[in-house]
Amino acid sequence: MLEAYLDIIAMLATVFGLLSAVGYFPQAFKMYRRRSSADISLSAYAIWLATAVVWTVYGIAIEEYPLIITSVVNVLGSLSVMVLYFRYKRKR
């Protein structure tokens, strides 16, 4: 009985992990469309990137593919925002 609940929780964790990881891409798309990185906190995205890298390494170490997949998507999302930040950063 407990295993059935654990399977459901694992599936939900994967789905919601992917949803949170995909959340970076609307910001990246908005930056790309506007050609502006105004009001973006680079430090916040750097922290999220570092966190995602650590979770990716941990997922690889314990061989948990849902964790690896969601963490890699998080890495790609935060990297995309950071790359666009530097590409569209205003010269001061």
Image (cartoon, rainbow, N blue to C red):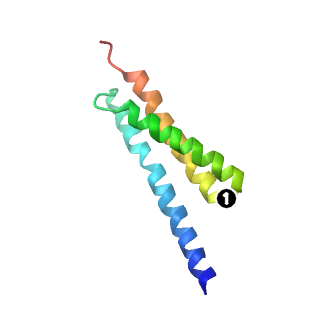
- x, y (%) of residue 53? 58, 41
- x, y (%) of residue 72? 59, 46
Compared to 84, does 13 lie above or below? Answer: below
The amino acid marked with disc number 1 is Glu
Compared to 77, does 32 lie above or below? Answer: above
- x, y (%) of residue 26? 38, 44
Disc 1 element: loop
Depth order, front residue of 52/38: 52
Quadrant for the C terminus, please. top left
Query: Residue visible at 60% across and 75% down?
Result: 7
Mark 1 = which residue?
64
Asked whether, in this view, residue 81 is left or right of residue 51, the answer is: left
Query: Residue visible at 43% across and 22% down?
Result: 87
Compared to 29, does 3 lie above or below? Answer: below
Asked whether, in this view, residue 69 is left or right of residue 81, the answer is: right
Compared to 82, does 53 lie above or below? Answer: below
Asked whether, in this view, residue 21 is left or right of residue 31, the answer is: right
